Image (cartoon, rainbow, N blue to C red):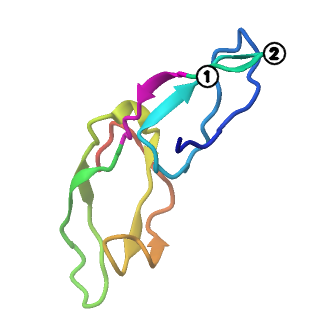
Amino acid sequence: ASRTEVSYGVPVGTNQANLPVDTAKSYYYVLVYSRNSDGQQIYPGAAYIVDNIVSASGIAFADQDIDNNELGGYVTWNPPSVVSLVTNYSFYLGTTNTGATRKRAGTSDVKVGTNS
C-alpha cells in the first residue's frame, strides 16, 4: 500500500494529530488506523482531502503617479471564497506573476475585510 506515516502512537483520548503546514499534497486521503498490542488494524478510517486554496482574485492596480518609472495608487482585490482561513494580506511587487522575484510593497499587512 502507498502511504506515509504522519504521526505515530497518538495516545487514546487525544483524537487529533498535526499535519504540518506546507506538507506536499501527494495523497488523496487522511487515514487513521487503530492500534493495540496485537498490532495495527487492517482497514483504516478515511477522509478525502480537500485542499483549500485561499488566493485573492480580481486584483487591480491603477497607477496614479504622474512621473515616469514611478508607481503609486491603490491595489484592490476580491477576497478568497474561504476567508475564514485568512488573517491578513501582504503586498509585494514582482517581476513575474508567481512571485519568483519579489519585493515587499507597503509598510504593513492589510487586515481581512479591508480589500484595498
Label 2 element class: loop
Q: Quadrant of residue 35?
A: top right
Q: Main secondary structure of the magenta part?
A: loop
Residue type at mark 1: give it.
Tyr
Residue 58 vertical placement versus 92 (above, below): above
Q: Which mark is residue 33?
A: 1
Q: Looking at the image, which residue is at 47% across and 52% down?
A: 109
Q: Position of residue 84 (x, y in %)?
A: 39, 30
- Whether the magenta-drawn stretch holds residue 95 is answered as no
Q: Residue at x 57, y 45 (%)?
A: 21
104 horizontally vs 41: left or right: left
Query: Horizontally, is 18 left or right of 93 in the view?
Result: right
SS for tag 1? loop
In front here: 101 or 61?
101
Residue 28 placed where, x, y %? Answer: 41, 40
**Type of residue at label 2?**
Ser
Q: Nearer the viewer, residue 59 or 26?
A: 26
Q: CA distance from mark 1 to mark 2?
A: 13 Å
Please state which of residues 48 and 22 is positioned toward the viewer in this rendering. 48
Q: Nearer the viewer, mark 1 or mark 2?
A: 2
Q: Residue at 29% of width from left, 50% of height from top?
A: 56
Q: Badge 1: how crowded within 10 Å, few (<14), some, or many (20+)?
A: few
- Kindly identify which numbered label has been placed on residue 8: none
Q: On the rendered structure, is 16 left or right of 65?
A: right
Which residue is farthest top?
Answer: 13
Residue 37's disc is 2
> From which residue to which does the magenta span run?
43-52
Q: Residues within 10 Å of mark 2 (few under 14, many from 20)?
A: few
Q: Position of residue 83 (x, y in %)?
A: 34, 35
